[in-house]
Amino acid sequence: MWYRGSITVPAGTTRAAYTSETIEICPGTITKFYRLFPPGCAGLVGMQVWQGTRQVFPATPGQYYLGDGSEILGEASVDVIEPDFVLELRAWAPNADYDHVVYCEFYIERSLIYVSPTSGRSFVPVPSNLSGVE
């Protein structure tokens, strides 16, 4: 299933005071990641994707994406199996004279297995319409 989001980055936004937008997702594995920096970003807009306290894209902590008129679709294999099932787009543009918008899409192969935040154990939620197992 595809999940889409965008983030508007005000001109002059510093990395320390980044702007953010969230995208609610399902548990599963991110297998594709599309990002679009429209023409005009001129390499002045930095962006990262986070899930909670973990930087997801780029995979190397501290790195970030830049672009200008660039559309990139990449393969990925990132498990998102711990709540909260939210991706956070973080972006900044300290040297920009104009506001910019960056677009992202994520393809997630849904999973019924995830990690319970209270017990730390994995489990499969059972649909409520099942009455039992014989």
Image: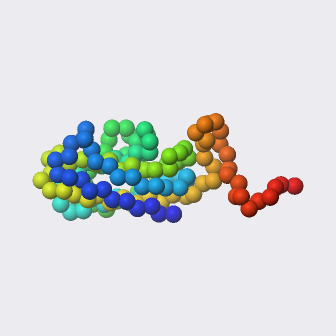
Q: Is residue 31 visible?
A: no
Question: Which residue is most to the right?
Answer: 134
Instruction: Name the spot of residue 60 as percent of width and height, x first.
Output: 38, 40
Quadrant placement of the C terminus: bottom right
> In front: 108, or 87?
87
Color encoding of the figure: rainbow
Q: Which residue does the image show at 70% across and 58% down from the upper left? A: 127
Q: How many marks?
A: 0
Q: Which residue does the image show at 20% across and 46% down from the upper left? A: 13
Q: Is residue 43 above or below residue 118?
A: below
Instruction: Name the spot of residue 108 as percent of width and height, x first.
Output: 51, 58
Q: Is residue 23 visible?
A: yes
Q: Is residue 35 above or below residue 90?
A: below
Q: Is residue 35 left or right of residue 114?
A: left
Instruction: Name the spot of residue 124 as percent of width and height, x first.
Output: 68, 50
Q: Is residue 82 left or right of residue 129?
A: left
Q: Which residue does the image show at 27% across and 44% down from the upper left? A: 18
Instruction: Name the spot of residue 88 as percent of width and height, x first.
Output: 39, 49
Q: Is residue 78 above or below residue 108?
A: above
Question: Which residue is most to the top?
Answer: 119
The image quarter in which residue 61 lies: top left
